[in-house]
């Protein structure tokens, strides 16, 4: 049973996870502490909106917490972990959502064998729809993994992967929502340019993506087969897809994922 949970770093990702956890009743708000480097307004905002506990002192947040979630940018990780390491013990579980950084690298910042689970959620956790991948470090046991899976299952799906796959996961499902929003921005722009009002375009495109997502989830057909079913010979879809091919969009998306993955590797090396 989790009696206390602390977020070290209270930015977008922490808020998304927090929103999902509170909506799911996984943990009562008074059991959750948030802390930040220096942004008091941010902490006040989170306290006002979610009624969680806030403190400027990372040690106070982490001390005695059953689960400590590290949600700072990779370049702030060393400071954040160093600031709490004296008040951690091996009964606590450290969950890092930091892109790129391995569980070994985090262990290297600690003086004790603290269980670490590395996780890659996405911001759809705010609506309980994250696709989260988790992997456990050397000192984390099966129970620690179960705790992390239970936590992330409250904010969407949670799947264990080998740590070697975490860079790829980061590139597809961590960053993935941004690629979808990018596509939506372009579709909305084109619709508005040809006279459709923004709200109608937004609603139609949003429902189209939700519907396509559900098809991907429930249909036995592959993405390519699903696409074929929409593409009448000589029809509108074929005309649209021809333009995507002319602009090498599929190759561009492959490059996008490859580049995001490489960046994840680089972020990990910087520590
Ligand atoms: N935003 C996203 O979609 C996702 C982000 N992540 C990872 O989550 C982590 C956080 O990302 P965001 O929330 O987007 O960043 P953010 O910039 O919104 O939040 C980071 C927060 O950490 C705080 N912070 C910095 N140093 C600190 C310290 N020493 N002690 C306590 N707090 C400190 C900052 O004040 C800031 O509020 C990153 O490592 C990122 O790779 C993972 C999955 C998805
Ligand atoms: O852009 C980033 O570095 C983080 C990791 C995955 C999503 N956002």
Image: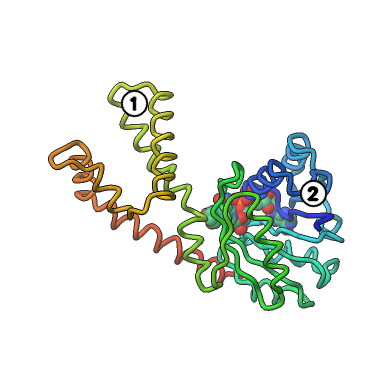
SS state under label 1: helix
Q: Which mark is residue 24?
A: none
User: Residue 201, how many percent across, how many down?
Assistant: 38, 27
Number of labels in the image equals 2
Q: Is residue 94 above or below residue 35?
A: below
Dot 1, crowdedness within 10 Å: few (<14), some or many (≥20)? some
Residue 57 lies left or right of residue 232; in this view the side is: right
User: Residue 195, how many percent across, how many down?
Assistant: 30, 21
Dot 2, crowdedness within 10 Å: few (<14), some or many (≥20)? many
User: Residue 15, how many percent across, how many down?
Assistant: 67, 45
Q: Quadrant of the N terminus?
A: bottom right
Q: Quadrant of the C terminus?
A: bottom right
Tag 1 residue: 192
- Is residue 87 or residue 140 the one in the foreground? 140
User: Residue 238, how many percent across, how many down?
Assistant: 19, 42
* Residue lying at 43% horizontally and 44% vertically, measured from the top left: 214
Residue 266 lies left or right of residue 240; in this view the side is: right
Distance between the alpha carbons at the discs numbered 1 and 2: 43 Å
Tag 2 residue: 32
The residue sitting at the left extreme is 234
């Amino acid at each position: 049973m989790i009696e206390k949970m602390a977020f070290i770093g209270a930015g977008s990702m922490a808020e998304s996870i927090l929103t999902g956890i509170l909506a799911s009743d996984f943990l009562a708000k008074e059991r959750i502490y948030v802390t930040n480097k220096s942004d008091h307004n941010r902490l006040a905002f989170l306290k006002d909106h979610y009624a969680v506990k806030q403190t400027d002192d990372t040690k106070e947040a982490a001390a005695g917490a059953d689960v400590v979630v590290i949600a700072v940018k990779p370049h702030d990780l060393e400071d954040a972990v160093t600031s709490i390491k004296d008040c951690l013990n091996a009964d606590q579980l450290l969950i890092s959502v930091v892109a790129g950084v391995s569980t070994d690298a985090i262990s290297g910042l600690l003086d004790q064998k603290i269980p670490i689970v590395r996780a890659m959620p996405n911001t759809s956790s705010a609506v309980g729809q994250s696709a989260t991948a988790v992997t456990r470090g050397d000192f984390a046991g099966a129970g620690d993994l179960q705790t992390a899976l239970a936590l992330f299952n409250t904010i969407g799906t949670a799947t264990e992967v080998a740590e070697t796959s975490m860079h790829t996961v980061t590139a597809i499902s961590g960053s993935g929502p941004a690629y979808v929003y990018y596509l939506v921005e372009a579709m909305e722009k084109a619709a508005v340019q040809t006279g459709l009002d923004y709200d109608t375009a937004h609603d139609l495109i949003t429902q189209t993506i939700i519907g396509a997502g559900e098809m991907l989830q429930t249909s036995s057909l592959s993405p390519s087969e699903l696409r074929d079913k929409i593409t009448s010979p000589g029809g509108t879809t074929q005309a649209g897809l021809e333009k995507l091919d002319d602009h090498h969009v599929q190759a561009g998306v492959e490059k996008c994922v490859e580049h995001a993955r490489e960046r994840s590797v680089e972020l990990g090396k910087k520590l």
